[in-house]
Amino acid sequence: MSAPIRVDEYVVARAPAKINLHLGVGAVREDGFHELATVFCALSLSDEVIANAAHGLSVSTSGEGADEVPDDERNLAWRAAAALAERAGVSADVELSINKQIPVAAGLAGGSADAAATLIACDALWQTGAAKADLIEIAAELGSDVAFSLTGGLALGTGRGELLSPVLAAGKWHWVLAVARGGLSTAQVYAELDRLREGQEEIPLLTPDRLMNALRARDLDLLGENLHNDMEPAAYSLMPELRRTRRAGLQEGAVAAVMCGSGPTFAFLTEDEESAIDLAAAISALDVARTVRTATGPVTGARIVA
Ligand code: ATP
């Protein structure tokens, strides 16, 4: 007979969404992945995962977009719990409740945040005693964004984006996130980028040197000038109406705009908290986005909150 469950045993963890301040996409490698040079920034927008002691593994999701998230082994949080249990040699006994604040399928790595929060919550619940390096290794196998959500802050991602090195820069920036309506799959946007680049002999990998200088100097205008995403032309080609969302934010006073990952969200850089609140209200009134949020970043990575 299995041991009785203590219903009071649970751990609550939170993990942040990310935006890419720079996303340079190089040529396709022999393994089929594109060579990337990206700068990740963790945001104050986060999902919460409650890991309850249970027999067997289950996932349920509540909050914005919950009905678009699978509650089975396709859920990245489920896969994170299963991977940690296997690595630690324990049985995957946990009931995971995900409370989503991060818009789903928006290029903000919400699924990856849930996986990162699950890793630290289950590590604490099962007392596996895994070292941070072990958790980062498991995270990297689940996806490059999962490893970043664990560590948070600002990081340079190279390779497929999975080779992370921290970027040391003080300061916090104020952002408005506008999630345009409609969906874009990451694979679709990469395929369109390849199509647009057909016949191009050399595909240089754009590195974020000037952006790094702006971050270190804490220079708002320089940061704005150097936000960059190579995926934008491909996303516009598939969804021309995205330009409207971008234009709206800039016309309403954003310092600069950059698309998040493969879209369809734009991150707008603003001068301060008040400008961010005003800009969010103005974009909402124009009805060019399904969701508009304010956030600050960089912030720390996944953490236990209870
Ligand atoms: P990516 O760029 O990694 O494809 P994203 O950051 O644009 O993802 P996510 O919110 O992570 O967006 O969701 C992408 C897809 O992953 C969703 O359509 C959903 O079906 C699936 N998914 C699996 N697990 C989760 C989860 N825990 N939360 C959100 N989506 C999840």
Image (cartoon, rainbow, N blue to C red):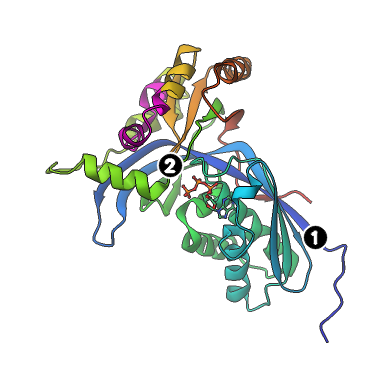
| Most common secondary structure along the magenta stretch | helix
Residue 153 at least partly seen: no
Question: Residue 130 location in percent, x, y?
Answer: 63, 67
- SS at circle 2: loop
**Disc number placed over residue 68 in the picture, else none:** none
Whether residue 70 is in magenta: the answer is no
Q: Is 68 left or right of 52, judged from the image as shown?
A: left
Residue 24 at least partly seen: yes
Q: Which residues are magenta?
A: 222-243
Question: Residue 37 location in percent, x, y?
Answer: 34, 44
Question: Residue 97 location in percent, x, y?
Answer: 73, 55
The residue pinned by badge 1 equals: 10
Say which of 29 and 263 sits in front.
263
Q: Quadrant of the N terminus?
A: bottom right
Give the answer, above or below, for where 49 lies relative to 92. Answer: above
Residue at the (61%, 59%) spot, across then down? 77
Q: Residues within 10 Å of mark 1 (few under 14, many from 20)?
A: some
**Disc number placed over residue 184 in the picture, else none:** 2
Residue at the (88%, 62%) spot, across then down? 8
- SS at circle 1: strand
Q: Residues within 10 Å of mark 2 (few under 14, many from 20)?
A: some
Give the answer, above or below, for where 79 lies relative to 246. Answer: below
The amino acid pointed to by label 1 is Tyr
Residue at the (72%, 72%) spot, across then down? 93
Between disc 2 and disc 1, whose residue precedes? 1
